Image (cartoon, rainbow, N blue to C red):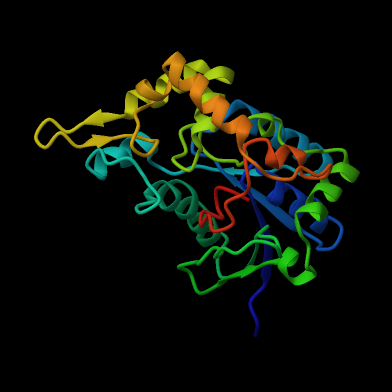
Amino acid sequence: MSKPIRHIVGLSGGKDSAALAIYLRDRIPNLDYVFSDTDKELPETYTYLKQIEAFLGKKIITLRAERGFDHWLDVYGGYLPSARMRWCTKMLKIRPFEAYVESLGDVDVRMYVGIRADENRGGYKPSKPNIVPVYPFVEAGYKLDDIHRILDESGVGVPPYYSWRTRSGCFFCFYQRKSEWVGLKENHPDLFERAKKYEKVDGENGKRYTWSEHESLEELGQPDRVAEIKVRQAASPGPVSKSNKLMHILGQDDDDLPCSFCHV
């Protein structure tokens, strides 16, 4: 006898997963929506999730790790997560999701991921054999313009933080560009200061542990440096179309960004 199948969309608070939830709402019955909350999200993320929830007409299930970011930072010896060691995604996003799947009992799960057809990055690789990732936008050939169309037609729109940031994720996400750190400083100075407190210098070898490569937030936040970053950003080339204007405010998408749990 085959196992029952549960259909789940993992929401990140970003545009692609939001569009996917909207796209699938009337296509798949009994669809569940989940969000792994790190407790380090932007305030705008929670606002956006409520907008999505209102459109879907169904509660988004919030998942949390048993231990938070500060605990795992200590376990990892104070090493901040980075592109080479993304323990934050593993411990605060993927583990809570897979624990939730385990709590469902003996079922097979179809996990719907909002990676687009015009992206070149790997998707979610589950550690549980009963979880099968599905990529509807890739199968349908949907690209960035299609995602904007879905969000516009639904009335949900894009997340409000897209006026200064290109992706979802924690307020101190190490994938942020220099200009996005400036955006955090200007839009959420309290969160910028909180992020600064995580940076440190190893007293033994002098090695610096910073969120932004080769530069501390203390350095990045200096007025002259902020002005320099803004000038460089304003001079960055790139065509801007009506449908993807917000996505180009801060530069082109990084199509090889691997954290599909955090950034779709």
- Residue at the image point whose x is 56% and y is 55% from the top: 260
- In the picture, residue 143 is in which quadrant? bottom right
Instruction: Return the residue nearer the eye: 178 or 111.
Output: 178
Measured from the top left, where is residue 161 in percent x and y? 66, 31
- Look at 63% across and 51% down and name the residue there: 264
Q: Which quarter of the rendered picture does the N terminus lie within? A: bottom right
Farthest residue to the left: give it: 204
Residue 244 is left or right of residue 78, and the answer is right
- In the displayed structure, would residue 21 be above or below residue 29? above
Foreground of the two, 82 or 241: 241
What is the residue that sits farthest to the top in this orientation? 223
Quarter assignment of residue 4: bottom right
Q: Is residue 138 above or below residue 261?
A: below
Q: Position of residue 91 (x, y in %)?
A: 40, 49
Residue at the limit of the structure toward the bottom, as seen here: 1
Which sits in the foreground, 248 or 238? 238
Height in image: 5 above or below 89? below
* Residue 89 on image: x %, y %: 45, 50
Q: Quadrant of residue 146?
A: bottom right
